[in-house]
Image (cartoon, helix red, strand yellow):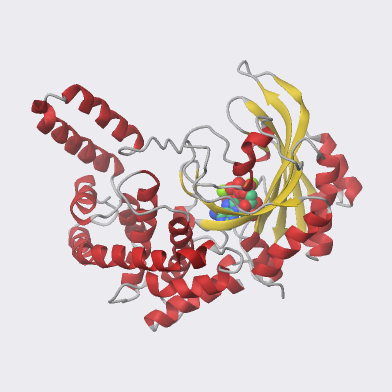
Amino acid sequence: MPTLNDIRSTFLSYFEKQGHEVVPSSPLVPRNDPTLMFANSGMVQFKNLFTGVEHRDYTRATTAQKCVRAGGKHNDLDNVGYTARHHTFFEMLGNFSFGDYFKSQAIPYAWELVTKELDIPKDRLLVTVYHTDDEAVELWKKTGVPEDRILRIDTMDNFWMMGSTGPCGPCSEIFFDHGDKYWGGPPGTPEEDGDRFVEIWNLVFMQFEQFEDGTRRELDAQSIDTGMGIERVAALLQGTNDNYATDLIRALIEASADATSTDPDGPGKTHHRVIADHLRSTSFLIADGVMPSNDGRGYVLRRIMRRAMRHAHLLGAQDPLMHRLVPSLVRQMGAAYPELHRAQALIEETLKLEETRFKQTLDRGLKLLDDELTGLPEGTKLPGESAFKLYDTYGFPLDLTQDALRERGREVDTAGFDSAMAEQKAKARAAWSGSGESADLAIWFDIAEAHGATDFLGYDTETAEGQM
Ligand code: ATP
Ligand code: MG
Ligand code: MG
Ligand code: MG
């Protein structure tokens, strides 16, 4: 049974044999793109090659890219622990052509890799194309995919755009059918969100350039950008539909179970899954230089850390837990990502310090939350002021409170939370107004409200974020 590390090597060496440069993953913090919070697809580091702004001495590349999707347009944080196929941190395998080959080569490469190198049975695979992309349909047929396994999709799931203008084009996605013991329907049906038909690989054909007036022309240099989720492929090759049951993530779940003397598959199952996932995203973010803070990227990191810590608390962990799991992660992933080795001590210290500090307020905050809930009639939302108090006094990010309530089938009155927040900001602004700097401060607060304190990290902007 191939391990996750085997699959990474198979993918990279297949494309290396096809003349692709093996390029290392870029850091999670994009170097040249302040508008993007974290690298969330393989194409991020190549954006300037696709737009022709930059040239390198290769026109074909292949990567295993570290990705974080916990904020902004692609936010999978709330899926973690609940779907079998989403992580906040995952690796995306990709092959890229910068004005070199196009669809007629990208399609047979993908099919050969999936059916020969990885040996996935053809009768379990489906492909989708954008509804008007007859060329892709013909190429898939020529490559050996029966027509009834090619689905035409007319939504933006199968059309990619870098922004409101610039490169864009149809996508074609490969899905694996885990069989009728799982709930879910094929892509394009109302049941597509189930865990039966799982998207494993997205091929983006950068075919057009889009202009401001909405018109398009064919690009001179047509390009390819693909992304395959390594954990999803590991799952199907290891005979499961659950990414969390694959070798690497399972090892982290077992480390969490050992450290808490609990059953990995018992009532704390969801907690272990969340902890294993969040261990990866927090450790990789710290290794790439992000530190917990109250704004921007650092706040996303803090939110993920605190969320993991609540799950550790629910497992009954009395002492800080996360830092004790780092050696297990380094064992699993340190060979492929040496930055984990280099940063191991920093990761452990940061996790331990954050958890030690947060523990003091976590217990009291959870107690308060319990008290609030006991008095609350069934079906009522938690008042916004309570959620705000948890945020303001106990350091509970809103999503942590929401995560805690989800287990009990409750929600937060988010509008009430927002107005409590706005009220506090207005008070803070008023308190400052005598300082003589009020005009500047008013501007600062407006920016802080819109963007999160001092960082202009508008991570929800319409910039290139790779696959969709
Ligand atoms: P989905 O529809 O399942 O959320 P997506 O369409 O958002 O996936 P893409 O943006 O096309 O995903 O990314 C390319 C590939 O990366 C996907 O085909 C999938 O295999 C993988 N992938 C995407 N998001 C995640 C995630 N949160 N965790 C693990 N793998 C992912
Ligand atoms: Mg998605
Ligand atoms: Mg999708
Ligand atoms: Mg996709």
Q: Position of residue 367 (x, y in %)?
A: 19, 65
Q: Is residue 16 left or right of residue 467?
A: right
Q: Position of residue 47 (x, y in %)?
A: 62, 37
Check the image and report above or below for 311 versus 160: below
Q: Position of residue 273 (x, y in %)?
A: 47, 68
* Extreme residue toward the right, this view: 142
Quadrant for the N terminus in the image: bottom right
Which of the 4 quarters of the picture holds residue 452? top left
Quadrant for the C terminus in the image: top right
* Extreme residue toward the left, this view: 434
Q: Is residue 71 left or right of residue 229?
A: left
Q: Is residue 257 left or right of residue 212?
A: left
**Residue at horizontal 69%, vertical 35%?**
154
Q: Look at the image and tell me whether residue 444 can be seen.
A: yes
Q: Position of residue 22 (x, y in %)?
A: 72, 54
**Residue at horizontal 77%, vertical 60%?**
13
Looking at the image, which is closer to me, 341 or 83? Answer: 341
Which of the 4 quarters of the picture holds residue 440? top left
The mark tally for this picture is 0
Q: Is residue 373 left or right of residue 64?
A: left
Looking at the image, which is closer to me, 152 or 35? Answer: 35
Looking at the image, which is closer to me, 53 or 128? Answer: 53
Q: Look at the image and tell me whether residue 196 can be seen.
A: no
**Residue at horizontal 81%, vertical 38%?**
100
